[in-house]
């Protein structure tokens, strides 16, 4: 059994990669209150379809969650 959970968040047009889709991974641990970002993006791609494929390669069983109204405007969706 693992003590952390990966969450993949898809961003569209973030400041550090304008005009691109970026997949970032965050680790949620029983030892921390806040999700911890992984330094290197999982993918920097041109389309949402490519971003989703990158998530599927990294975690084939991930399930998509729609964005929440309170999410930053650049967030498209998250996968858990």
Image (cartoon, rainbow, N blue to C red):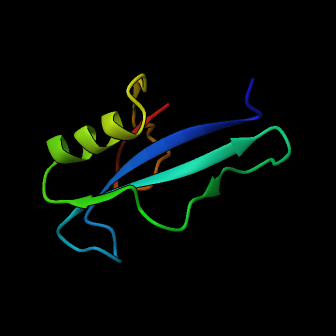
Q: Quadrant of the N terminus?
A: top right
Looking at this view, is 46 or 60 the one in front?
60
- Left of 53 or right of it: where is 46? left
* Percent x, y of residue 60: 38, 27
In the rendered view, does 72 fall on the left or right side of 57?
right
The residue that appears at 43% across and 27% down in the rendered structure is 62
Marks counted in the figure total: 0
Q: Residue 28 in the image: x percent, y percent?
A: 68, 43
Seen at 53% across and 40% down, the residue is 7
Can you say whether 17 is above or below 30 in the image? below
Taking 16 as reference, is 33 left or right?
A: right
Picture coordinates of residue 69, whole percent (x, y):
44, 40
State the residue at coordinates (43%, 47%). 9
Where is residue 63, by image quadrant? top left
User: What is the quadrant of residue 77 in the picture?
Assistant: top left
In the depicted view, which residue is nearer to us: 68 or 62? 62
Q: Where is residue 33 shown, x and y percent of the image?
A: 80, 47
Instruction: Name the outermost residue toward the bottom.
Output: 16
Residue 17 vertical placement versus 43 (above, below):
below
Horizontal side of 8 relative to 49 (left or right) equals: right
């Amino acid at each position: 059994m693992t003590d952390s959970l990966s969450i993949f968040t898809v961003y569209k047009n973030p400041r550090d990669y304008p005009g691109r889709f970026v997949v970032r991974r965050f680790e949620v641990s029983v030892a921390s209150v806040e999700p911890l970002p992984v330094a290197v993006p999982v993918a920097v791609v041109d389309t949402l379809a490519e971003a989703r494929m990158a998530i599927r390669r990294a975690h084939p069983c991930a399930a998509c969650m729609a964005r929440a109204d309170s999410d930053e405007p650049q967030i498209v969706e998250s996968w858990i």
